[in-house]
Image: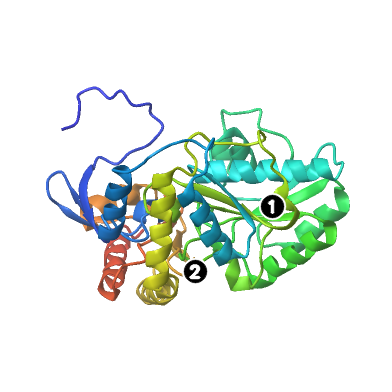
Amino acid sequence: MQPTVSHLMRAYARQPVSFVRGSGARLWDEQGVEYLDAIAGVAVTSLGHAHPEIAAVIAEQAGMLLHTSNVFRIDWQERLGERLCALTGMRTAFFCNSGAEANEAALKLARLHGQRRQVAQPKILVMENGFHGRTLATLSASGNPAKQQGFEPLMPGFLRVPYDDIDAVRRMAEQVPDIVAILIEPVQGEGGIRVASVDYLRALRTLCDQHGWLLMLDEIQAGMGRTGTWFGHQHAGITPDVMTLAKALGNGLPIGACLARGVAAELFSPGQHGSTFGGNPLACRVACSVLDIMARDKLPERAAVLGARLLAGLQEALGEHPDVVAIRGQGLMVGIELSRPCKELVGQALAEQRLLITVTRDTTIRLLPPLICDDAQIDDIVVRVTRLLASNAD
């Protein structure tokens, strides 16, 4: 029952729906109305809602031990670090509670890397339309002026170039001697589902090697199987120096990770960074279970198959729609760009189609279905989105 007066800060433009139960890709509201979830908590619940194995692990661990702090060894944290490093080719891991915190750790590593190279004012190259979080540092690294407005002065030390434009990066390298790192998403999620080309990512790897920069990849939304490989950059066959994860790593339980290799792996020393709750036994054990289930059920490979089905279905149904500018994506990370602002479609999709979607950059419908969807649910998403746009055609 909704209180007559809300005591929550107005940080969100919430839809007037409250969900009380979920199962797989389905949700039910307080009135028992069923919905199809095509956003998975914004790329978080990739295993679906109320996964029985995850629920059992949470219950068992909660009955044993939740928190001791990082003053002591945490066995599940060490296990998770070993698992993630084996999957990624990285060397060390730092655990925190969110994607923004993971990116904060990466930015601090870049600053330390610069100081070790005697760069007094180190610069980090970031991308237009990129998004890395809402703390002051990650907001400053992001390329969305609307989200930055009101929080000036932003943190210095960031240089911005167009996404997927290697010539712009090369020009910046020639003009600015103090660059120490590049921070980039292999697929821009909040930026409108824009996929970096394989050649671009490979060229970035080469440039970083040539100049001694850290290549830092924000895999918070694209990682954990969503694009059809375990991590988005693996489509290009490269390995970053620093990589950040969160979202689907805990399937809804808050956890973030910053992974590093090479010189970046040994930059932190005791006291230079930390987290009270980061890497607690509950979060790390759940993340280990997420990895187990994804590997056992081959969910990254499944995401590639389902993503191709979703893209093909949308292109066939909407390719001639007068408002559709582009349909693009990778795996189960799909965007439908329209020729007009369309934020109102989020509410209409809920009310009229019983479908959960989001809209990014004002004009792009974003679809991030759970990786455990079946073929029929993917086809149903196509049908409901098509009906939604048919009722809103100009």
Q: Residue at x 45, y 62 (%)?
A: 335
Position of 77 relative to 136 (above/below): below
Q: Residue 77: x, y in percent?
A: 49, 49
- Nearer to us in this view, 381 or 41: 41
- Asked whether disc 2 touches disc 1, contact meaning CB atoms under 8 Å apart, the reply is no
Which is nearer the N-term, disc 2 or disc 1?
1
Per the image, label 1 sits on a secondary structure element best described as: helix
Q: Residue 65: x, y in percent?
A: 36, 41
Q: Is residue 287 left or right of residue 89?
A: left
Work out which residue is located at the far left of the displayed protein and give it: 31
Per the image, label 2 sits on a secondary structure element best described as: loop
Identify the residue position indicated by label 1 in the image: 265
Gap between marks 2 and 1 measured at Cα: 30 Å
- Nearer to us in this view, 284 or 244: 284
Q: Residue at x 38, y 74 (%)?
A: 306
Q: Residue 382: x, y in percent?
A: 31, 69
Position of 202 relative to 55 (above/below): below
Q: Residue 362: x, y in percent?
A: 46, 49
* Residue 226, quarter of the rendered image: bottom left
Q: Residue at x 75, y 53 (%)?
A: 263
Quick check: can you spot residue 207?
yes
